[in-house]
């Protein structure tokens, strides 16, 4: 009997291109967390009550105090900051330390004029390079445009003309000078920003600022902005990413909001129903498990954040019903990661998202409440002081909700699985759906024992760091079998061989792990132990066969381990990022304890014949490091089976 995923593959354009994943009755999924109206809709129409907001500010001392702080923050920015045509924006991912890829701290001090260097939490003095200056500019410009929206809101709330005058002046500046900014990347054509993703997300904010000004802007001025700014910006964002992609969602949402602003029905229909319009983006980009098909779980929230402003604006213009299907899908996209969490609340890190993420994403749930109300979101937003709560006061949650249990589950259309038995929980990533954001990590797994992280995928670093391509995306960074030091060649959907919730067991294969190799892995929880059986086979004769393993605890190594500088010899560059390397020779089996905060586990590694086991310090979530092992047979072989067992230490 063919699986759901196999049936989907029959209608794919390519071997693992996007398909329209079945999502029947989406309003019924994750229903325990949703708040539905009398018609059973898990969404609502956003409200913008300016008269009520004025009454609240006048009558409520807490709101009055909030307004004073908001006014002071906006006034301070307006008094101090001006954008410049000579500033070319860089890439937001370039804000990383060259030392350890830790995030650079942004401040509003102008580099080289008011600050002579940057810093990060672990790198106090970072040179201001052209790349980092570009990163500073893109961050500045995003904040500057956001201040335009906040100033426009202050105008609507207080009637103070100076705010409208400033916003109009900024809009004139960007419209008059848009074509003076030359694209840093001619292939994308973005002018204000480095890439069309940022151009689209920025356009959303510009659109909101102009919408808020309303009739304060003359017909002639609006039309001038439309011709000189909004029209060329829409042309730029529609020139790229004519495909299914998270960036394309942002682009279509931005174009749709411009269409609503100017009443352009043709643009609205193209943004929604065009060849790569929003409806197709969500049909093919969201799997039946309600995970974004590029697999990094952060993209669930990223795509939802692209949709929220459109949902709000559509509601305010009387067009929310046209997006009813998309609202239902977005609600599930927002909630799905909660059902993948480990017991301590952290999320797995498949694909190239940042590691260390936790769920529920309470900030997102709160921000979504105006259109996608949930019990968790309304609980989080209670007492919140911001523009959303002022203009559209949230209701009290109708009921308390505990976080749902996370059972063993196969997420076949997403190429992932969860095993849960006793204190053990395992996340297994056994294939990819697209090349976008994929890494050499198919057959990787993460595991926890109770609330203790045992082994994890550390995610990745800013794309501008050499560690991104050089280490975090490579096989050595993950718990995977390696051939000549290399992991799987993505993207490969792989094959699910078997899945059982009870007993907890999953098995999957990668027939084309590499061009000349296949691999498979079975994970099982038996008698309180986690047992991993990984196999790799070469189709081109004997090769160096090995296995990478990473732990979040402290290993108690046998005395036979000694300093070893041979790990990098004739191996990929990724091996050069390990430090303090030691090794020992074993035959058939190696055994040692790993001490965690609340538990000590006995780790047993079994391999055929003689092997060398290296131990070292490897990059974890920056700037942290972790303990890692690399096992390799001492003689090349055509195939090998490696068995790793984690068991409570006696």
Image (tube, rainbow, N blue to C red):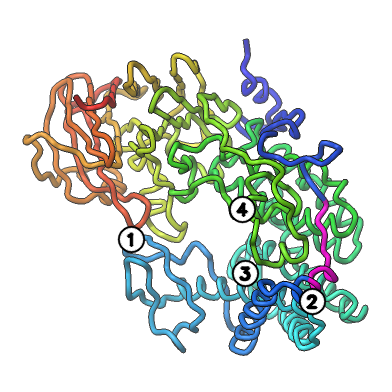
Mark 4 Cα within 10 Å, few/some/many (few <14, many 20+)? some
Label disc, if present, on residue 157 of the rendered structure: 2
| Quadrant in which the C terminus is drawn | top left
Q: Which region is colored magenta?
A: 45-55
Q: Is residue 20 left or right of residue 438?
A: right
Query: Mark 1 touching mark 3, by CB under 8 A?
Result: no
Q: Is residue 171 left or right of residue 190?
A: right
Determine whether label 1 and label 2 are within 8 Å by CB: no
Q: Earlier in the sequence, mark 1 or mark 3?
A: 1
On the picture, is 530 further left or further right than 240? Answer: left
Q: Is residue 339 magenta?
A: no
User: Which one is closest to the eye, mark 1 or mark 3?
Assistant: 1
Compare marks 4 and 2 and give the one earlier in the sequence: 2
- Sequence-earlier tag: 1 or 2: 1
- Residue marked by disc 1: 100
Say whether residue 46 is magenta. Answer: yes
Q: If the image is split into quadrants, where does the N terminus sit?
A: top right
Marks 4 and 2: CB-CB under 8 Å? no
């Amino acid at each position: 009997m063919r699986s759901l995923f196999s049936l989907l593959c029959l209608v794919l354009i390519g071997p693992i291109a996007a398909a329209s994943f079945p999502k029947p009755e989406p309003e019924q999924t994750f229903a325990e967390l949703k708040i539905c109206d009398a018609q059973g809709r898990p969404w609502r129409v956003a409200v913008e009550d300016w008269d009520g907001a004025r009454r609240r500010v006048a009558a409520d001392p807490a709101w009055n105090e909030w307004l004073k702080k908001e006014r002071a923050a906006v006034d301070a920015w307006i008094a101090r900051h001006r954008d410049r045509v000579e500033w070319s924006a860089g890439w937001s991912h370039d804000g990383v330390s060259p030392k350890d890829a830790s995030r650079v701290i942004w401040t509003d001090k102008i580099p080289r004029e008011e600050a002579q260097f940057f810093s990060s939490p672990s790198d106090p003095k970072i040179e201001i390079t052209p790349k980092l200056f570009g990163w500073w500019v893109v961050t500045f410009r995003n904040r500057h445009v956001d201040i335009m929206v906040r100033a426009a809101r202050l105008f609507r709330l207080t009637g103070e003309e100076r705010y409208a005058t400033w916003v109009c002046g900024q809009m004139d500046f960007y419209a008059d000078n848009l074509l003076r900014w030359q694209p840093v990347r001619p292939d994308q054509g973005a002018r204000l920003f480095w890439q069309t993703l940022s151009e689209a997300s920025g356009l959303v904010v510009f659109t909101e600022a102009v919408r808020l000004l309303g009739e304060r802007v003359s017909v002639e001025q609006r039309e001038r902005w439309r011709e000189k700014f909004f029209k060329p910006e829409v042309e730029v964002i529609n020139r790229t990413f004519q495909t299914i992609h998270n960036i394309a969602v942002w682009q279509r949402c931005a174009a749709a909001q411009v269409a609503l602003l100017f009443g352009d029905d043709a643009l609205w229909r193209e943004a929604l129903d065009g060849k790569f319009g929003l409806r197709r983006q969500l049909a093919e980009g969201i799997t039946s498990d309600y995970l974004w098909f590029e697999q990094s779980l952060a993209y669930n929230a990223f795509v939802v954040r692209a949709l929220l402003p459109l949902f709000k604006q559509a509601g305010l213009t009387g067009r929310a019903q046209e997006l009813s299907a998309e609202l239902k899908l977005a609600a599930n996209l927002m909630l799905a990661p909660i059902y993948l969490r480990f017991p301590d609340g952290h999320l797995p890190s498949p694909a190239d998202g940042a590691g260390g993420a936790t769920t529920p994403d309470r900030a997102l749930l709160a921000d979504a409440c105006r259109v996608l109300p949930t019990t968790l979101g309304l609980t989080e937003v209670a007492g919140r002081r911001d523009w959303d709560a002022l203009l559209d006061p949230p209701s009290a949650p109708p009921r308390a909700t505990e976080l749902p249990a996370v059972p063993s589950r196969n997420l076949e259309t997403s190429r992932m699985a969860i095993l849960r038995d006793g204190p053990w929980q395992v996340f297994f990533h056994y294939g990819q759906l697209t090349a976008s954001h994929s890494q050499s990590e198919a057959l990787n797994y993460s595991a926890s024992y109770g609330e203790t992280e045992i082994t994890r995928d550390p995610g990745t670093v800013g794309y501008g760091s050499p560690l991104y391509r050089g280490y975090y995306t490579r096989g050595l960074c993950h718990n995977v079998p390696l051939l000549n030091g290399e992991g799987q060649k993505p993207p490969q959907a792989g094959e699910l061989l078997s899945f059982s919730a009870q007993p907890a067991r999953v098995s999957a294969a990668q027939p084309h792990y590499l061009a000349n190799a296949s691999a498979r892995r079975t994970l099982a929880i038996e008698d309180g132990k986690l047992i991993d059986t990984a196999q790799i086979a070469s189709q081109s004769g004997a090769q160096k066969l090995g296995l990478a393993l990473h732990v979040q605890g402290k290993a108690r190594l046998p005395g036979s381990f000694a300093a070893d500088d041979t790990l990098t010899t004739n191996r990929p560059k990724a091996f050069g990022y390990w430090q303090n390397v030691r090794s020992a020779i074993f035959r058939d089996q190696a055994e040692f304890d790993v001490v965690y905060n609340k538990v000590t586990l006995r780790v047993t590694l079994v391999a055929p014949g003689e092997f060398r086991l290296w131990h070292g310090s490897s990059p974890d979530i920056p700037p942290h490091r972790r303990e890692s092992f690399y096992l390799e047979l001492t003689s090349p072989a055509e195939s090998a089976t490696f068995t790793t067992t984690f068991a409570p230490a006696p």
